Amino acid sequence: MAGHSKWANIKHKKAKEDAKRAKAFTKHIREITVAAREGGGDPDANPRLSLAIENAKAVNLPKDNIERAIKKGTGELDDGSGNYEEVTYEGYGPGGIAYFIEATSNNLNRTVGEIRHIFTKHGGNLGTDGSVAYMFDQKGSIKIENSELDDEELMLIAIEAGAEDVINEDDFVEIITAREDLFDVSNALEEQGIEIESANLIRIPATEVKAEPDTARTNLKMMDSFDENDDVSEIFTNMKMDDETLELAETE
């Protein structure tokens, strides 16, 4: 889980920088819209929508934007942007690193072209559906920042709530759950007075591939390119990113 953890840490820091940018809002608006379309506009009856709203509030998405996104999802509002669809892409980066990309798009032809271009530009290739999905396990991820509890107390509460693992990073704690337990564990933690920063479904590689510094550097640049694409919502890889590799890879 080391590679996932390191990339999660990088993403967490980037999210702080991105919070004031349009993409952060766009991602959450699309997630709310899709969640409302699939499960209805009542967050009390739609766990996915409830989590989407909480995640949006964490980046200060205005209430009006949240309400419009829900109405767009339920069909009460047509803003002219078309219907957004969830889509996934699979492929390989330099060094045989596996990639699983999640996106939300209102133009699938545009998105697949952009994804293919990013793979090709960085020496990778877009694969077929199922080519790497089997390498990843879907889990729940809950992030907590600035908890007043000490690590041991937080871990005990999380495990009792149904968590599978607790990972301590530099400035946040990530709690891993079974896919189907994400909503229940998140609620249980909030009932204990723990403030949740975000709760999402993630994909963790079953096995990781260690990359040499040059390969790691190229893959990190490719991850950044995916992350900058407005349609891409999540990026998962099986690259093993220990501290030494990251330090060398980030040295130009």
Image (tube, helix red, strand yellow):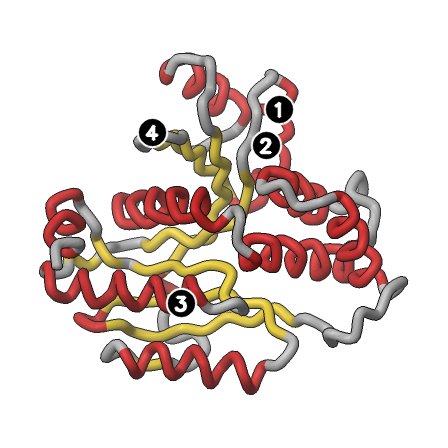
229 and 158: which is toward the camera: 229
Amino acid at dot 2: Ser
124 and 27: which is toward the camera: 27
Task: Find out whether the residues at labels 1 and 4 contact each other: C-beta distance under 8 Å.
Answer: no
Quickly name the residue at label 4: 168
Residue drawn at (58%, 58%), measured in percent from left and top?
27
Q: Position of residue 187 (x, y in %)?
A: 64, 29
Quickly name the residue at label 2: 186
Amino acid at dot 3: Phe
Quickly name the residue at label 3: 226
Q: Which of the two labelled residues, at mark 1 and mark 4, occupies the earlier sequence position?
A: 4
Q: CA distance from mark 3 to mark 2?
A: 28 Å
Q: Dot 2: what SS?
A: helix
Q: CA distance from mark 3 to mark 1?
A: 32 Å
Q: Which of the two labelled residues, at mark 2 and mark 4, occupies the earlier sequence position?
A: 4
Residue drawn at (49%, 18%), measured in percent from left and top?
157
Task: Find out whether the residues at labels 1 and 2 contact each other: C-beta distance under 8 Å.
Answer: yes
Q: CA distance from mark 1 to mark 4?
A: 19 Å
Amino acid at dot 1: Glu
Q: CA distance from mark 1 to mark 2?
A: 6 Å
Amino acid at dot 4: Asn
Question: Can you tell which of label 3 and label 4 is closer to the viewer?
Answer: 3
Q: Position of residue 90 (x, y in %)?
A: 40, 73
Q: Residues within 10 Å of mark 1 (few under 14, many from 20)?
A: few
Q: Which of the two labelled residues, at mark 3 and mark 4, occupies the earlier sequence position?
A: 4
